[in-house]
């Protein structure tokens, strides 16, 4: 990259910090994680000094540069954050103080964020492929464009201004999706905005949940408990187990992680799922639900953390009921009132059987589903557009930084 600024080796603006302790004290120390590709430095899980096998360490100071010896070639370099003050660093990390009379910390941080050094460090590092070490002398030889301090500050001001605009654009796109999702939930809640036993529109009728199930025995089922399905019975292939990770709001997520033998699946045949079944998270994201799509073969077994609901489709549309579970104030009121566990919320069959539903005629249910499906299609298109523009926005800042280091801002 050509620059109108002089190219200066980092050894001119960095000094290696060489103070070590030989035996950490028996106390809890902060620990740092240096992310790859200039993504910054964050706190890792704290560590107890007495439990460390390696005795020689450094104590990091806020504002120092920290370099990973092993992953420096992949851009693992950054600044120790304020919360990293006093963190323990093993001999696989190097610390450096900066010459603040020659370089602004934020300017050097912009260099790291742009991952400007990776090609130079990668080319010079020596060692086993994939683990080539980057030592201080290699870092000191890497060159960066270094304008005068006042120019650095001017560049930083411009970068911050453009970065703020990029983040504002991201926020506008996030907000558009959130507002669209809220609109669907609002429309659904308005359609079913009735207190139990209120007067209903013509043709509608109040019904208890059990009256719209195929039957009370198989219409609502909790997944097999641990006594029926042991962890030791889980394997890598066979008949799939459908879990909470497969359930998003109104959307089945394909792919399975756990399986059982066909013989065990036959034993648990009452927990098999089929197309049109509604599966409901009974813990975690309580009430999140989706319908089982056509074409799953072999038919999966539900996990213990799910409820399965089978509706009489002559009474209520499974797709509409799933939408209600995910988005309506009617179900939220029930959850808020009833879902209270000792340590976390739970949905249970007992709670769901308390539900009274305002049931429209089937023809009207189909019209509601079609209307909401149309809104969901538009929302999905908005989400796709947001993902595309998000990628474009992510590419903008590196382009801005590249121009900055060429002196073109």
Image: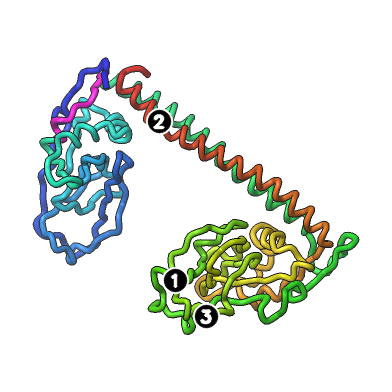
Of residues 349 and 247, the one drawn nearer to the viewer in this rendering: 247
Please provide percent x and percent y for residue 48. Answer: 22, 63
The residue wearing badge 1 is 238
Q: Residues within 10 Å of mark 2 (few under 14, many from 20)?
A: some
Q: Earlier in the sequence, mark 1 or mark 3?
A: 1
| Mark closer to the chain start, 2 or 3 | 3
* Tag 2 secondary structure: helix
Circle on res. 285:
none
Residue 29 occupies which quadrant of the picture? bottom left
Q: Which residues are magenta?
A: 139-148
- Location of residue 370 with respect to 319 vertically, above or below: above
Q: Picture coordinates of residue 186 (x, y %)?
A: 71, 51
Please state which of the two labelled residues, at mark 1 or mark 2, is closer to the viewer: 1
Q: Can you name the residue that lies furthest to the right here?
A: 202
For label 3, the residue is 266
Q: Nearer the viewer, residue 348 or 383?
A: 383
Relative horizontal placement of residue 121, taking residue 288 as reference (left or right): left
Snapshot quadrant of residue 377: top right
Residue shown at the point (23%, 33%) measured from the top left: 119
Q: CA distance from mark 1 to mark 2?
A: 47 Å
270 within the magenta span: no
For disc 2, the marked residue is 397
Q: Compare marks 1 and 2 and give the one earlier in the sequence.
A: 1
- The x, y position of residue 40, in whole percent, is 31, 42
Which is more toward the observer, 323 or 313?
Answer: 313
Residue at horizontal 26 percent and vertical 55 percent from the top: 30
Q: How many marks?
A: 3
Figure quadrant of the N terminus: top left
């Amino acid at each position: 990259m050509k620059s109108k600024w002089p190219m200066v080796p980092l050894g001119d603006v960095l000094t290696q910090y060489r103070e070590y302790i030989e035996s950490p004290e028996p106390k809890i120390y902060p620990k740092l994680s240096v992310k790859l590709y200039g993504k910054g430095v964050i706190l890792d899980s704290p560590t107890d000094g007495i439990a460390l096998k390696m005795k020689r360490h450094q104590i990091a100071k806020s504002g120092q540069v920290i370099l990973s010896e092993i992953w420096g070639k992949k851009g693992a370099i950054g600044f120790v954050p304020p919360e990293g003050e006093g963190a323990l660093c093993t001999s696989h990390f190097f610390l450096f103080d900066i010459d603040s009379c020659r370089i602004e910390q934020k300017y050097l941080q912009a260099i790291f964020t742009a991952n400007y050094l990776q090609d130079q460090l990668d080319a010079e590092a020596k060692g086993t492929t994939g683990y080539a070490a980057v030592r201080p002398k290699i870092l000191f030889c890497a060159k960066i464009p270094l304008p005068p301090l006042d120019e650095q500050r001017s560049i930083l001001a411009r970068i911050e201004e453009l970065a703020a605009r990029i983040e504002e654009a991201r926020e506008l796109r996030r907000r558009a999706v959130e507002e669209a999702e809220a609109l669907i939930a609002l429309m659904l809640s308005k359609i079913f905005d009735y207190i139990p036993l209120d007067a209903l529109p013509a043709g509608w009728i109040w019904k208890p949940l059990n009256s719209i199930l195929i039957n009370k025995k198989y219409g609502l089922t909790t997944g097999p408990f641990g006594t029926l399905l042991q962890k030791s019975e889980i394997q890598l292939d066979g008949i799939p187990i459908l879990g909470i990770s497969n359930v998003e709001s109104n959307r089945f997520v394909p792919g399975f992680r756990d399986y059982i033998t066909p013989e065990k699946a036959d034993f648990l045949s009452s927990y098999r799922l089929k197309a049109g079944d509604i599966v409901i998270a009974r813990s975690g994201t309580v009430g999140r639900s989706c319908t089982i799509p056509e074409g799953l073969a072999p038919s999966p077994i539900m996990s213990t953390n799910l409820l399965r609901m089978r509706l009489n489709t002559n009474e209520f549309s499974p797709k509409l009921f799933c939408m209600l579970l995910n988005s309506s104030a009617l179900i939220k009121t029930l959850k808020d009132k009833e879902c209270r566990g000792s340590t976390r919320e739970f949905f249970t069959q007992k709670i769901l059987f308390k539900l009274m539903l305002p049931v429209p005629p089937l023809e009207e249910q189909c019209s509601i589903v079609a209307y909401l499906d149309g809104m969901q299609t538009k929302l999905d298109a908005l989400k796709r557009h947001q993902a595309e523009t998000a990628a474009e926005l992510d590419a903008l800042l590196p382009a801005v930084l590249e121009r900055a280091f060429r002196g073109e801002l």
